[in-house]
Image (cartoon, rainbow, N blue to C red):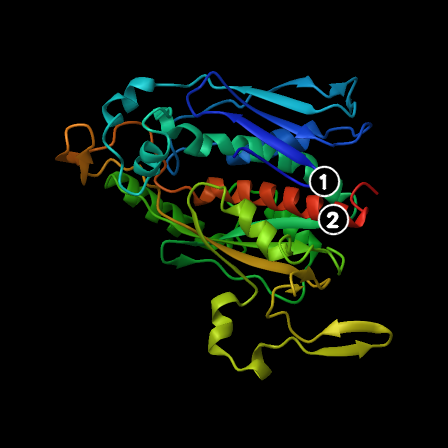
Amino acid sequence: MNNIGNNIKITFFGESHGEYLGVVIDQIPAGIRINFDLLDFNLMKRRPKEGISTTRVEQDQYTIISGFKDGYTTGAALTFLVPNTNIIKEDYSKLKNIPRPGHSDYAAYVKYNDFNDKSGGGIFSGRVTILWVIVGSICQQILEKQNIYIASHIESIKNIYDNSFEKNSFEVEMLKTLNKSSFPLINTEIKPKMEDAIMKASSAGDSVGGTIESAIVNLPAGIGEPLFLSVESYLSNLLFSIPGIKGIEFGEGFNLTRLNGSEANDQYEFVGNELNFLSNNNGGILGGISTGRPIILRLAVKPTSSIAKAQKSVDLSRKENVILETPGRHDPQIVTRAIHVVNAVLNYAILDLLLFSKKGWN
């Protein structure tokens, strides 16, 4: 299934080493001027960086083939095409019948009866996430006009940790600063340690994972469509479409299980005529509905599956055990690239939910 959405419907198409990737964005109204500077900047942040990412670098040139004229959306389906140009299909020829441990290869082999395109991971490749960045950038510019801001920081690489967000108070300027960085950190002094851990893993033919912490600020109270389009359920549904995401928690998440109810509950008070929360342990969501407090969530990103280090696998056609050293160009970690996709997904999901209240286009 490659389409989703309620008030904004999107359809993705294409594969990692196919001629084109593309996205159709439907139900975007006429008269929106696309901020291409923002779009191009977000695409740049997602691209690989020397030493800590894959050496496959695509320039992410795109063409709009429908729904756009003279600088504005027309109301027709808005369609972007993105060519793939830096392709080496032969890197994947030896993987035709040998699944990479930790990758989608075996599950896809079974589901698609061996007919799926395996080059570069096909539809399961991180390359496809460029489409999320395109969609999310358009949604970001719409949300920010309403003073709704979304940003993330790299909370950890392996066992090296950044500071965490304050859960109950936020300065929008901090989120704006994080969104200006391709390696967003609250404590920028730990960047060299994280880079060193990444490069050590790369030198050993291995990979590392990490965590991402995200914040959504100034979303009004009352957004979310329980039961099955609650804020948590919809965000989780979309975020798990990003390759490598293996866990999610909101607010204090699993840590709530170690607290008493009296400690976990977010108590209330009035300050003048304004309702105030004394804490934000539930991450800005109660009953699947936004409370008006910052929405805080945390994501687990697994170590990149495709690694050069020798691993045990099998030849599915010969039914033999083999030792696999995966050829090709691989990311020693994907946290620094996935974080920008996470922001894009969140911008899309929040705007799509906001439109149930008919406030999104204001």
Query: What secondary structure is found at the residue carrying circle 2?
Result: helix
Marked residue nearer the N-terminal end (1 or 2): 1
Location of mark 1 (residue): 7
CA–CA distance between discs 1 and 2?
A: 9 Å
Image x and y of residue 201, in percent: 29, 44
Disc 1 residue crowd, few under 14, some 14–19, many 20+, Cα 10 Å: some
Outermost residue on the right side: it is: 273
Q: Residue 350: where, in percent of width, then height?
A: 67, 48
| Residue depicted at 62% across the width and 22% down the height | 80
Q: Hey, what amino acid is under mark 1?
A: Asn
Depicted 271 relative to depicted 307: above or below: below
Left or right of residue 195, residue 177 in this image: right
Q: Amino acid at mark 2?
A: Leu
Q: Is residue 235 above or below residue 130?
A: below
Is residue 333 in view?
yes
Q: Closer to us: mark 1 or mark 2?
A: 1
For the C terminus, the quadrant is: top right
Residue that label 2 marks: 354
SS for dot 1: loop
Q: Splitting the image into 4 quarters, where does residue 305 fall?
A: top left
Q: Which residue is painted at 68% across and 76% down in the image?
A: 278
Q: Examine the rendering and report whether any part of residue 48 can be seen.
A: no
